[in-house]
Amino acid sequence: MTEPVGGPAAAPVGDAAAAPVAAGPRSEGGGGWLVACDLDQTLIFSRRSFRLPAGVPEPPLSTAEHIDGEPAAFLTVAAAERLAALDRLATLVPVTTRTLAQYRRVDLGVRPRYAIAANGGHLLVGGQPDQDWAAEVAGRLAATSAPLAEAAAIAEELAAGGWTRLTRVADDLFVYLVAHHRDGIPDLGPASARLAALGYTVSVQGRKVYLVPTGLTKGAALAEVVRRAGTSHLAAAGDSLLDAPMLAGADVAIRPAHGELHDRGWTLPGLRVTAAAGLLAGEELAASLVDLVSPAPAAATPWPAAGAGAARARLA
Ligand SMILES: [Mg+2]
C-alpha cells in the first residue's frame, strides 16, 4: 500500500494554506507519541460554548474557523501555541465527525500529516482522502449496517416534528439533524432502538443529533493511522460518545469537564478529566498533552495509563 508523502500534493488544513510547512523533526515512525484530538468542543469552540466562569475575562483568542467570512470557532492563543508544540513533539492527528468540507474550513495553524474526518470515514494523508481507506470503510459499512437511506428515512420521520433546522446526509456516510434549540430535541429513545437494529448509533452533541453506522468509528481510522505511523504510544482527547472508543483504546485518555461524556458521567480507568470546562478546558488539555509528550524529565504529574499499551489491538 502506498501513500502520498507531504510534498506539493499535500493540502494544508484550511487557511494554513499560506503558512510555511513546519520544519523540524517529528517523532513519527518507530516510536514516540501519537496524539489524537477531537476538534469541536474539545479543542475548538463556538462562542455559545465558551462556558467562561462568571468574572473571568475572555482570554486572547485564535480563530479556528470562518463561516461566510465570520469567525465561527476559536481556541485560546495559548491553546494554539500548545497545539503547535504538540505537532512538533508528536504525531498530532485531528479527529473529527465533521464532513470533509467542514473539516477543511478549520485552520489550526498546523499541518499534521494525518487527519481523520467524517467520524473515521475519511483518513486524510497530506490533506487528501486516502482511497484505500475509503474502500475499507465502504466494505465495513456494507457488512455491518443497513443502507444509509434507511437511517435517513428515520431521520426524516424524526424531523417531521418541526424541531429541526436541517437534516443532512454527510459525505454519504452518516446522517445528522440540527435542532433550532437544544431543548427542542425530543426523546430519541424509540428512534434509537430502531436505529440500533439497523446498525446505527445515535449521539447528541449540542444542537446536533448524529445517526452514525456502528462500523464508522474514529477508533478504527485511528488504528490505521497508528499502524501506518508506527508510533508506540497513543494519547486521545474527546468530549462525545463518538470519541469513547478512541479514548478507551488509548494509553492515555483525557476529556473535558463538559459535553456528552461528562453529562453521562462517563469514565474509564486512568481517565483524566480537565478541571476547567469549555474554552479553557481546551487549553488545559492541550497543555497536559504537551507535558505528556515532552522529552524533558518534566511531566510534573505522572499520567496514569488508561491501559497498558497495545492501542492498536484495542482500537481495532
Ligand atoms: Mg467533539
Image (cartoon, rainbow, N blue to C red):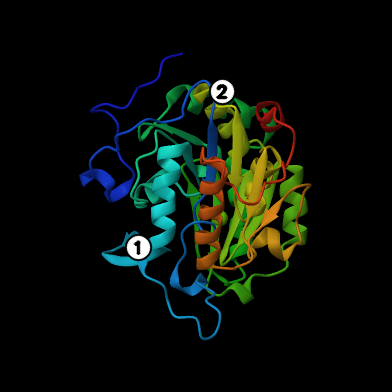
User: Where ligand 1 lies, by quadrant?
Assistant: bottom right
User: Where does the image place residue 171, in percent across and percent down from the top left?
Assistant: 46, 42
Residue that mark 1 sits on: 62
Q: Is residue 165 left or right of residue 240?
A: left
Is residue 216 visible from the viewing direction of this image?
A: no
Q: Residue at x 56, y 63 (%)?
A: 281
**Label tally:** 2
Q: Residue at x 47, y 49 (%)?
A: 98
User: Where does the image place residue 275, in percent across and percent down from the top left?
Assistant: 64, 66
Q: Seen from this angle, which residue lies furthest left?
A: 18
Is residue 128 visible from the viewing direction of this image?
A: yes
Which quadrant of the figure contains the C terminus? Answer: top right
Q: Viewer-proximal residue, 193 or 124?
A: 124
Q: Residues within 10 Å of mark 2 (few under 14, many from 20)?
A: some
State the CA–CA distance, disc 1 to disc 2: 33 Å
Q: Amino acid at mark 1?
A: Ser
Q: Residues within 10 Å of mark 1 (few under 14, many from 20)?
A: many
Residue that mark 2 sits on: 227
Q: Amino acid at mark 2?
A: Arg
Please tell me whether mark 2 sits on a helix, a strand or a loop: helix
- Compare marks 1 and 2 and give the one earlier in the sequence: 1
User: Where does the image place residue 134, in percent across and percent down from the top left?
Assistant: 49, 28
Q: Which mark is residue 17?
A: none
Q: Is residue 76 left or right of residue 299?
A: left
Q: Residue at x 61, y 56 (%)?
A: 239
Q: Quadrant of residue 182?
A: bottom right
